[in-house]
Image: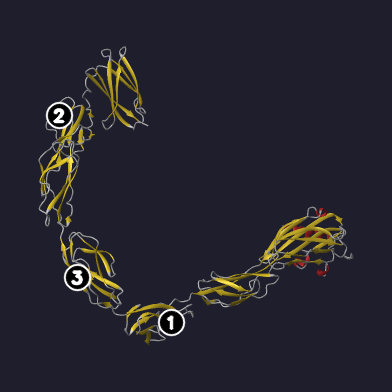
Amino acid sequence: MKQQITMVQVIFSFMITLIPALLIARDAPLTTAGSSTICPGNVTVPVTVTNFSSIKAISLRLDYNPTQISFVSFTNLNPTLAGASINNVPVNATLSKVMIAWTSIIALSLTNGSKLLDINFTMVSGSPVIAFNNTDNSGGDCEYADENGNAMNDIPTANFYFNSTITNLGAAAAGSINGPSILCAGTTNVTYTVPPIVNATGYVWTVPTGASVVSGGNSASIVVNYSNSAVSGNITVAGTNTCGTGTSSALPITINPRPVPVINGLTSVCLGASGISYTSDQGMTGYSWNVSAGGMITSGAGTNTITVNWNNPGTQTLSVNYINGNGCTASSATVITITVDPLTAAAGPISGTGNVCAGTNGVIYTTSVIPNATLYLWTLPPGATISSGQGTNTVTVNFGPTAVSGYVTVSGSNPCGVGLPSSLPVMVNPLPADPGIITGPANICPGTAGVIYSVPAIPNAMGYIWTIPPGAQITSGAATNQITVTFGPVPLSGQITVCGSNICGNGPISPDFNITIGPIPPPVVTAAGPVLTSNFPAGNQWYYEETGAIPGATGQAYTAVKTGWYWASVNIYGCNSDTSNHVYVLFEGQPDIFNTASVLLYPDPNDGRFTILITDTERDSCIIRIYNQAGSEIMNIHEDILNGSLKKNIDLNPACPGIYTVVILHGTQKTIKKVLVTR
């Protein structure tokens, strides 16, 4: 770009040197940068000429402030100036220039008022000037050359170059806001002003949260009210007109909350109390205390601690206000209520029964209203409780099963103390005491007779009440502490309980004595290699398919020694269980049991679907049994072998992945195969 400008200057210089010194320079054309009056935004500056006659070269420089206006582009270049160079060149932070350069071999002319080009800007702020610079570079940045190459006369500059002035119609930036910046919450009628804003037809104000503009909202002066909940923030103002809103200014506002004084001291006192101390927050000024007619401040007025004498009964009040360190007072004084109580009178006689059974509920005791009492205090014999009316002159009492004889008493009370009591003696007849533990056999087989259950003698009991499980019958001792029971052929498991009884009712029920009736559920056997384990810790008997019961194999675990099927049963309480699940144990090197038939199982592994192919010319039928990993039979198939072979498709789905056992019985022989099911 700089090279292009230099070349124009060189051309001017060269052309000028060719002209005889006797020639007198012609006046340069009149060049005008168009002015406009607009709102901030895009602006187009047309560059026009007058007296543009026989011109061979142009060099024009237009200076502007880039903080006020920014170059965008040029448009509408006059076709006569084809090949012209237009460049925007930053000079410094506040100066940029638009350089226009053009040369021609043939001198050209334009009619008056012709446009050279439009230069497009974006206006940012202020009212910028776009000025022709005919001083820098010895005036060479603004120059015309005539048909002979002579530099044309353009001095004085103001007679030949007419600058563009962009008049900004937008509202100017707001000046500083005047008004108090530190206030107490709740302050009202506060005035704020701003100097008149150029071009502004209106004013836009904002105030902190909790503040409100009560007058002057569209002017240069407003009145603001701050609520008690107002918070610190900014007051801002900006001018506005049809062009929009201008740049705002702000005044930081500090809102100091109003204090809320506290009062510490007794809120309930007795009539005649004196020298009662009350305190408020320390370190403040201007303390103002007030007391209602029932009290008198005896010392400390104007400080944070006072003493008061209370001379009249009833509800009284005490209040305080002060000025805090920010110069703020409470919006209203803090007020507390003081209750001045009289003494309570003595209690009158108690009415109600004086003879009850332990365990009796809903017994009512009452006394007449006690003058000046705000609360009634009752005491009862041990084991008795108030179920309703606590604190009143009538109570409902429950005598628990362990209640004993004693006194029912009552007295009135209020914050000033407890009055004299009255009392009523009450005789409590006890219920039978807690039973002990029932003894006797807990595990019974159906049909067992003559079973004895007993409990230690129950204090205060005149009789005994027993409960037994369904299907059982008490054959003797029903009202005593020992019974004889017969269990029928189909009894149910359950509980035996007992309680004592007397004229006051039944005593507490004994802890449950649980009876378990056989048969015992069959055990569940799991295998870890040859080690088999029952889920019953005792009473087991182990079995092997070839020998039946295994002598001496009665523990919870048994270790197999031969290939084959094993299971267990349990005998507990004299009752035998059914047999457990059967578990097959296979030892490497031991045959599966004679296998003369040809058995093929495929595919293996599979997804739960496979085929069994049996070839046996000696048999005409077989049984196929399939067991899962736990040893439980999941399939039992009876099939005929026709023409010496049998092909059977098996589908175990839905089947869990794992190893399944296939047992094929044909005649007296057995074949055992393992198959792996995968997914």
Amino acid under label 3?
Leu
Give the vertical position of 544 relative to 412 (above or below): above
Residue, disc 3: 424
Q: Nearer the viewer, mark 3 or mark 1?
A: 3
| Label located before the other in sequence (3 or 2) | 3
Question: Looking at the image, which is closer to me, 213 or 660?
Answer: 213
Question: Looking at the image, which is closer to me, 615 or 121?
Answer: 615
Amino acid under label 2?
Ala
Amino acid under label 1?
Met
Q: Quadrant of residue 532?
A: top left
Split into 4 quadrants, where in the image is the N terminus?
bottom right
Q: Quadrant of residue 486?
A: top left
Residue, disc 2: 549
Split into 4 quadrants, where in the image is the C terminus?
top left
Relative horizontal placement of residue 335, taking residue 672 as reference (left or right)? right
User: Is any part of residue 221 visible from this angle?
Assistant: yes
Relative horizontal placement of residue 493, taking residue 371 as reference (left or right)? left
Give the vertical position of 106 relative to 191 (above or below): above
**What x and y, as percent, mark residue 518?**
18, 37
Residue, disc 1: 284
Relative horizontal placement of residue 388, taking residue 69 as reference (left or right)? left
- Mark 3 to mark 1 CA distance (whole Å): 59 Å
Relative horizontal placement of residue 147, taking residue 331 as reference (left or right)? right
| Label located before the other in sequence (2 or 1) | 1
Q: Identify the element where label 3 is drawn.
A: strand
| Mark 1 nearby-residue class (10 Å; few <14, some 14–19, many ≥20) | some
- Mark 3 to mark 2 CA distance (whole Å): 78 Å
